Image (spheres, rainbow, N blue to C red):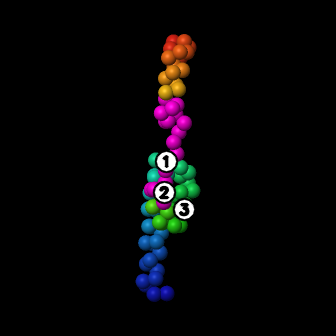
Amino acid sequence: MNESSESIWPLIIGVGLCAAVMGWQIAKRKGLNKRNWSLTCFFFWPALIGLALAKSQQRPGETEAFRNRWTSLAAYDPEIKAG
């Protein structure tokens, strides 16, 4: 093999590792499966674009309806008021 074909593999592995780390961090911030997204990004780098555009998973306590319901419950339940 010639010199130019051997020197491309470290570059490919390095870009894959960078994509995997970035995929892990973005998935962690969005509440998605970190391991699956990092592996996907390692083998298929353009998946980072899809991950960046994906919606975050919202936890139940972060909706406005839940906060309003909790405020109403806390206002009328003596055990919660006592605290």
Depth check: give the residue in front, 48 or 68: 68
**Distance in Å between CA atoms under marks 2 and 3:** 10 Å
The residue wearing badge 3 is: 40
Query: Is residue 20 within the magenta segment?
Result: no
The residue wearing badge 1 is: 56
Q: Residue at x 51, y 67 (%)?
A: 44
Secondary structure of the residue carrying tag 2 is helix
Secondary structure of the residue carrying tag 1 is loop
The residue wearing badge 2 is: 51
Q: Which residue is drawn at 54% across and 12% down?
A: 78
**25 over 16 or under it: above or below:** above
The answer to whether the residue labelled 2 contacts the one labelled 3, judged by CB atoms less than 8 Å apart, is: yes
Q: Which residue is drawn at 49% across and 47% down?
A: 56
Q: Give the magenta part as a residue range.
A: 50-67
* Amino acid residing under circle 2: Leu
Percent x, y of residue 75: 50, 17
